[in-house]
Image (spheres, rainbow, N blue to C red):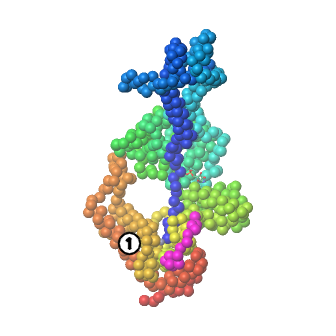
Amino acid sequence: MTDKQPVNTPSGTGPAQSPNSGIRLIVWFLTVFLFSYFWLDMSQTQQRQDLSYTEFKERVRAGDVATVTMQGAQVTGTLHRPEPVTGANQAPVSNRFTTTLPPIDDPQLIPLLEEQGVEVRARAEEGSWWARLLVGLIPWLLIIGLFWYASARMQERMMGGGGAGGLFGFAKSRAKRFERGQSRVTFDDVAGLANAKRDLREISGYLRDPEHYRKLGAKIPRGVLLMGPPGTGKTLLARAVAGEADVPFFSISGSEFIEMFVGVGASRVRDMFESAKKEAPAIIFIDEIDSVGRARGTGLGGGHDEREQTLNQILNEMDGFDPHETVVVLAATNRPDVLDAALMRPGRFDRKVTLDLPDRPAREAILKIHSREVPLAADADLARLAALTVGFSGADLENLVNEAALLAGRTGRNDVDMTLLLEARDKVVLGGLREMVLSDEEKNLVAFHESGHAVAACMLPHADPLDKVTILPRGRALGVTEQIPDVERHNFKQSYLYDRIGVMLGGRGAEKLIFSEVSSGAEEDLKQATNLARHMVTHWGMSDRIGPVAFRRGEEHIFLGREMAQQRDFSEHTAEVIDAEVSRLLKAREEDIAQLLERHRALLEALAKMLLEKETLEADEIQKLVAAHPPAST
Ligand code: ADP
Ligand code: ZN
């Protein structure tokens, strides 16, 4: 079976880009250019001797000169024999020389050359002065261009585009600023979240008419913490507050600070607050505040220092607000448990608004909002779809509708019907269908494995109802058994959890029963079952041997405002008892399931057979098989 909880990928910003290939190309080109430029130059000066005009004429008279090439005032030529080498360290002297003619024409030169039998060549004067100037300038132009380019890229990376500031502008705020009116979001675009909306309506009212509130002597919170799982609409809601109040919205993500040089984060915070104050009333939104707002004092490392400085700057800015500065800071997190207590002090983020995953009516409303632009077929039943999407976040639902529209586009349809919506839902939950060739033997194994989950789901009294079984590979799984809860659960009973573990172990149980050995295919099942069992023992007091104790371990542990890394608050002995309890619980469940499957072996085999034929079985087909195969009487 597969976990039905959709996995949310955090929507962080990507890592800083590596310098673009353009820069590399320029650097490479420059290197080659400069190298050959200097090398040619050097090799030429090394090999030629520079003669004075007098010396040159003497050599001609002495009959040393073989050839002469004249190019304007510039003369190059060769001697009959090289100059004798005098010192050991002297550079080798070639028989080539250069000299320059005097500005006044020497009428004796040509006759002298002719007399001595020197071969004279004349070349047209090389390009005009400006052409030579240009050639000389090219390397410099290239260097300047490179600097300009690098500085522009740097600025772009640091600021997210736009704005002045030159080479040193990177400390400026990269906060994205949404203009008023431009893609304005209001509370109507936010479905559900009634409590959160009610709390935030006050803020937008204040921003719209601060005078009114001031006259009433009302104190409006400076900071509001939005807490909730990813994709529940924290960013959306913050934008809606700004949209309702019709004020500018500055947004920045805490995780962006982490990738910066020390000191940049703080100056960027300062800058963002400055801009917001200038345009007040305004809203500042800090997404993922937990990445800078974790409990401080965790010590070493530049990264931590940077985080601490950034956090301090945020707190300083908030403390330094004047009463007339109508700027409200909204911050979002899905880890309120790790936040530094200092963030929550009065005058800072002293208001908390919790966003939950949407319930059924809210899911329907969200589906409606996001399918506004999608042509739905008559049979598209959003209410039913809402019932089938327990545990989906707003972002997941948006994704679902989009997937369905994409599927419709791919299959050449011009509307989206229920089948497509359901397919899109499967895709969001389970991952896309995977083309894979399995051998018959593997298929058989997967069919029995999934049937084992299915039988457990049908027969365990507290398990969630079975919806679908398939042996078509999806996402990372070779087969999927899907249950859909009939009610929204906010609280789990022990009996429900036991049966949930039972269903997870059903796949492996069936393999053992039918093939007398198990395969590696149950890895994910075992991981989930173990996690759940451990949680029951260490967090929910569901083990009699351990008793009503909640243990904390690892990262989330905060003690006296300090985050204790890998610190657990129980002894080695207790750790052993916990491990023993977890494995006892799992073993007991394994045994129960083995018995259950044995009793229902006929059903198990019938399910597997039918799965091999049809690949996917829906709830009603499974129920028919269940009715036709009663348990063996023992
Ligand atoms: P968070 O900031 O909590 O991670 P977002 O605000 O970025 O979540 O939500 C992602 C997207 O999901 C939003 O852009 C919106 O389209 C959709 N969404 C989430 N919650 C809702 C909601 N309650 N109503 C309408 N759309 C929602
Ligand atoms: Zn399984």
Q: What is the quadrant of residue 430 in the picture?
A: bottom right
Q: Quadrant of the C terminus?
A: bottom left
Residue 517 location (% of width, % of height): 41, 78
Does any portion of residue 198 appear in the rendered image?
no
Residue 25 location (% of width, % of height): 55, 40
Q: Residue drawn at (46%, 64%), measured in percent from left and top?
A: 491
Residue 45 location (% of width, % of height): 49, 25
Q: Nearer the viewer, residue 557 or 127?
A: 127
Q: What is the quadrant of residue 193 in the picture?
A: bottom right
Residue 373 location (% of width, % of height): 70, 55
Q: Amino acid at mark 1?
A: Leu
Q: Nearer the viewer, residue 126 or 616?
A: 126
Eyeballing the image, is 24 above or below 616?
above
Residue beneath disc 1: 586
Q: Residue drawn at (36%, 74%), measured in percent from left and top?
A: 587
Numbered range of the magenta stretch = 432-445
Q: Nearer the viewer, residue 377 or 64?
A: 64
Eyeballing the image, is 297 above or below 467?
above
